[in-house]
Amino acid sequence: MLVVIGTIRLAAGSINRARPAMAQMVAASRAEDGCIGYSYAEDIVDAGLIRVTELWRDQAALDRHFTLPHLAVWRAAWPVLGISDRQLRVYEVSAARET
């Protein structure tokens, strides 16, 4: 399994304008074969910081994700929504357990 963790930055005051595009991206990504989880969360301390969490079955599923139309639509919206400072890391995970 692959875990993608990171952040993106929204321009000040643009969260409400960005929500519909973010919701569409989340819904479309969650519907993909191989997507185990996909979410965005607003940081409660750092306004405009969005925390990204993605879980993918394997590299092939993540690679396919990058080729799909909804990702292109999402990325095309970034300048309009003031999205910047994308910092994501991919981690390979062999097993998960409860803490």
Image (cartoon, grey):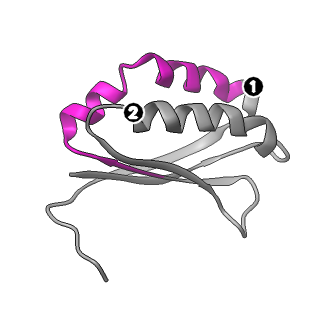
Instruction: Tell me where the magenta segment starts and ends, as one range.
Output: 53-79
Location of residue 27 in the rendering, given as x and y in whole percent from the top left corner: 51, 35
Bin the neighbour count of mark 2 within 10 Å (Cα to Cα): few under 14, some 14-19, many 20 and up: few
* Residue 56 picture quarter: top left
Magenta stretch secondary structure, dominant: helix
- Asked whether, in this view, residue 63 is left or right of residue 94, the answer is right
Report the residue at 19% width, 32% height from top: 60
Q: Is residue 49 above or below residue 17?
A: below
Q: CA distance from mark 1 to mark 2?
A: 25 Å
Location of residue 57 in the rendering, given as x and y in whole percent from the top left corner: 22, 44
Bin the neighbour count of mark 1 within 10 Å (Cα to Cα): few under 14, some 14-19, many 20 and up: few
Location of residue 66 in the rendering, given as x and y in whole percent from the top left corner: 37, 26
Q: Which residue is mark 2?
A: 31
Q: In front: 14, or 38?
A: 38
Q: Is residue 51 above or below residue 66?
A: below
Circle 2: residue type: Ala
**The furthest residue to the bottom:** 99
* Residue 18 picture quarter: top right
The numbered mark, 1 or 2, whose residue comes first in the sequence reads 2
**The furthest residue to the left:** 94
Report the residue at 80% width, 42% height from top: 16
Front disc: 1 or 2 = 2
Question: Which mark is on residue 80?
Answer: 1
Q: Quadrant of the C terminus?
A: bottom left
Question: Which mark is on residue 7?
Answer: none
User: Element type at marker 2?
Assistant: loop
Report the residue at 50% width, 49% height from top: 39
